[in-house]
Image (spheres, grey):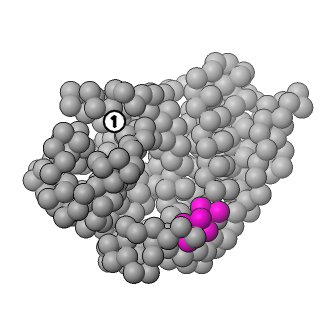
C-alpha cells in the first residue's frame, strides 16, 4: 500500500486524548465529526438461504432481511469510518489530521465496548472477518496521518487482535468443511493481513498467508475455484467474492515480504485473469457450475465494489485484460477493502 513515511510535526506534537463519546468532536473547535453508532457487541443470526438449498444459492427473503438488519449498523459504521479515513489521505495538514483523529476516536469507542466479541451463531462467525478487515483498513489509513494517543492506540490494537484471534481459532477449529476453504476463509485471511499491518503483527500476517493460499491453491488450470463453482447459478458471484480478498490480501503481504503470487503455479494470477475471461466466455463458468449464471442472464449485474481488487493487482502486474474489463466500473471502491482503491495503490 502507499505509505506516508513521515508524520507532520503537528501530528507528532498533538496529544490525542479524545476517546469514547468524544469522537463526535474529534476535529476540535466543537465541530461535530460524525455520530458514532452504539457499538454492536453481540451478533447472532441464521443463514440467508433456504433450508432446502443444497448449493446455498436460493435466498430466503425473510432470513436475508434479518441478516441485513443485524449487520447494517456495523456495515454503515464501516462505510462512515472509511469515508473519513479516505479523506484523511486526500486532505493535507490540519484537515487531514482532524479526519484521522475522528477515525481513531470512533474506533476507540467500539474498542472500549469490545464490539463484535459475542458472536452467537455460525453465520455471525462467518460474517465477522470482513467487518474486522474494514475496521483495520480504516485504522491503518488514519495511522498514516496521525499517531494515536498511546492509551487509545493500545486499546484499538488489542481489540483488533482479539477479534482476529477469535476468528483465526474459529476458522481453524470450528468452521464447516467448505467454509474453512472457500471465499469466507479468504476474507478471514485478508482480515488477518489488514489487522497485521494495522497493528504490526507478524503472527497475523503469517496466518493470513496460510489462509489465502489454502483457498487460492484450489484453483484449476484457468483460475476457477471449485468450491465457488459449486454454488449453482451464483457461482460467478461467489468467485468474485473470493477474488477480492485473495488479490488484495496477497498484494498487502507482498509489501511484507510474502510472495504469494508465485505460489501454486501462479494460482492467484489465474484467479484474477479468470474474471475477464469468464465474461468473455460464459462457458468457463456454466460448464463448471452446470447452470446459467445470474450475472450473465440479466438477473444480477456486476457492481464496481466487486471489482475493487483490480487496482491492487494492477499495481504489481501489467494485465491489459483486467485493466480493460474494469475501466467502465471506475472509480473502484469497497469499504471492507479500505474504500477508494486509487488512494491505496
Front-most of residues 213 and 323: 323
| Residue ID at (23%, 62%) | 291
| Residue ID at (54%, 49%) | 134
Which span of residues is magenta-colored?
A: 63-69
Q: Main secondary structure of the magenta part?
A: helix
Crowd rating for badge 1 (residues with CA inside 10 Å; few <14, some 14–19, many 20+): many
Is 127 above or below relative to 102? below
In the rendering, at what x and y percent does residue 70 appear?
64, 65
Is any atom of residue 169 visible in this view?
no
Under circle 1, the secondary element is helix
Quarter of the figure with residue 158: bottom right
Quarter of the figure with residue 54: bottom left
Total number of numbered discs in the rendering:
1
In the rendering, at what x and y percent does residue 164 appear?
51, 62
Is 140 above or below relative to 162? above
In the rendering, at what x and y percent does residue 222 appear?
13, 50
Residue 302 colored in magenta in the image: no
Horizontal side, residue 281 vs residue 103: left or right: left
Front-most of residues 142 and 31: 31
Q: Which residue is mark 1?
A: 310
From the image, which quarter does the N terminus lie in? top left
Amino acid at each position: 500500500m502507499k505509505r506516508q513515511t513521515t508524520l507532520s510535526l503537528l501530528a507528532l506534537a498533538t496529544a490525542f486524548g479524545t476517546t469514547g463519546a468524544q469522537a463526535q468532536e474529534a476535529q476540535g473547535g466543537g465541530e461535530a465529526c460524525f455520530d458514532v453508532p452504539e457499538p454492536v457487541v453481540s451478533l447472532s443470526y441464521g443463514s440467508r438461504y433456504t433450508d432446502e438449498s443444497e448449493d446455498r444459492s436460493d435466498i430466503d427473503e425473510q432470513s436475508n432481511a434479518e441478516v441485513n438488519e443485524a449487520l447494517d449498523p456495523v456495515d454503515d459504521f464501516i462505510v462512515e469510518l472509511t469515508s473519513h479515513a479516505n479523506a484523511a489521505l486526500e486532505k493535507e495538514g490540519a484537515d487531514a489530521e482532524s479526519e484521522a483523529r475522528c477515525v481513531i476516536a470512533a474506533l476507540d469507542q467500539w474498542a472500549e465496548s469490545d464490539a463484535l466479541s459475542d458472536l452467537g451463531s455460525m453465520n455471525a462467525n462467518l460474517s465477522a472477518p470482513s467487518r474486522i478487515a474494514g475496521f483495520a483498513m480504516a485504522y491503518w489509513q488514519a495511522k498514516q496521518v496521525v499517531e494515536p494517543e498511546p492509551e487509545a492506540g493500545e486499546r484499538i490494537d488489542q481489540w483488533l487482535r482479539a477479534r482476529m484471534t477469535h476468528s483465526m481459532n474459529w476458522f481453524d477449529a470450528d468452521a464447516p468443511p467448505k467454509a474453512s476453504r472457500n471465499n469466507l476463509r479468504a476474507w478471514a485471511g485478508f482480515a488477518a493481513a489488514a489487522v497485521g499491518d494495522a497493528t504490526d503483527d507478524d503472527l497475523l500476517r503469517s496466518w493470513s498467508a496460510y489462509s489465502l493460499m489454502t483457498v487460492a491453491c484450489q484453483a484449476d488450470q484457468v483460475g476457477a475455484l471449485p468450491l465457488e463453482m459449486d454454488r449453482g447459478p451464483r457461482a460467478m458471484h461467489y468467485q468474485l467474492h473470493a477474488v477480492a480478498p485473495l488479490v488484495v490480501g496477497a498484494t498487502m503481504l507482498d509489501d511484507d515480504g510474502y510472495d504469494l503470487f508465485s505460489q501454486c503455479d501462479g494460482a492467484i494470477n489465474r484467479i484474477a485473469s479468470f474474471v475477464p475471461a469468464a465474461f468473455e466466455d460464459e462457458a468457463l463458468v456454466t460448464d463448471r457450475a452446470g447452470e446459467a449464471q445470474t450475472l450473465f442472464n440479466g438477473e444480477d449485474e456486476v457492481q464496481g465494489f466487486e471489482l475493487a481488487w483490480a487496482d491492487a493487482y494492477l499495481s504489481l502486474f501489467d494485465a491489459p485484460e483486467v485493466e480493460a474489463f474494469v475501466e467502465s466500473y471506475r472509480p473502484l471502491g469497497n469499504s471492507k477493502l479500505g474504500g477508494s482503491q486509487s488512494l491505496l495503490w
